[in-house]
Image (spheres, grey):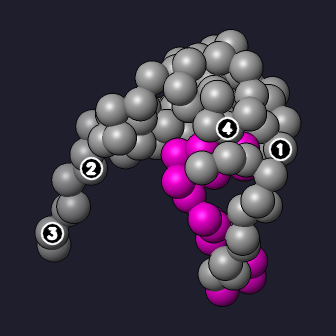
Amino acid sequence: MNKKTKSTIQEFIDSLSPKELKKYKEERQEFILSELILAAMEKDNISVRNLAKLAGVSPTIVQAMRSGTKKDFTLQSFLKVLKGLGSKGLMVELHGQYIPLDIPLSAKR
């Protein structure tokens, strides 16, 4: 009988209590969001101030999203930053199907 070896991360996740697992998942989502913004900014060689200007938000909001320090920004701010980065839409999974959503044209770019 073959016993499948678990990865280090899977062993870590399996060791978490339900409360710890919930916190881990929330923090992972925040990390992924900040990494997405950082990667897009680096690819386009765009500064915090320039992105804030393109998005129509304050540099403080962009910096907080980028660093992951602000955890409760508005959906409107998030969509403005995405639009400032050149995104035209995003996908939402609902009951196993992906639904494309357009990003409102409120941000400049």
Mark 1, residue position: 76
Q: Which residues are magenta?
A: 78-97
Can residue 89 be seen here? yes
Position of 95 relative to 80 (above/below): below
Quadrant of the snapshot with the N terminus:
bottom left
- As helix, strand or loop, the secondary structure at mark 3 comes to loop
Residue 17 part of the magenta-drawn span: no
Mark 2, residue position: 6
Residue 2 is labelled as: 3
* Three-letter residue code for mark 3: Asn
Mark 4, residue position: 55
Q: What is the spatial separation of the Cα atoms under label 3 and label 1, in whole angstroms?
A: 50 Å
Q: What is the spatial separation of the Cα atoms under label 3 and label 2, in whole angstroms?
A: 12 Å
- As helix, strand or loop, the secondary structure at mark 4 comes to helix
> Which comes before the other along the chain, label 3 or label 1?
3
Asked if the residue at tag 2 contacts the one at tag 1, i.e. Cβ–Cβ closer than 8 Å, the answer is: no
Q: Residue at x 33, y 32 (%)?
A: 45
* Three-letter residue code for mark 1: Gln
Q: What is the spatial separation of the Cα atoms under label 1 and label 4, in whole angstroms?
A: 10 Å
Q: Residue at x 55, y 39 (%)?
A: 33
Q: Residues within 10 Å of mark 1 (few under 14, many from 20)?
A: some
**Closer to the eye: label 1 or 2:** 1
Q: Residues within 10 Å of mark 4 (few under 14, many from 20)?
A: many
Q: Residues within 10 Å of mark 3 (few under 14, many from 20)?
A: few
Asked if the residue at tag 1 contacts the one at tag 3, i.e. Cβ–Cβ closer than 8 Å, the answer is: no
* Three-letter residue code for mark 2: Lys
Q: Choose between 50 and 60: the one closer to the eye.
A: 50
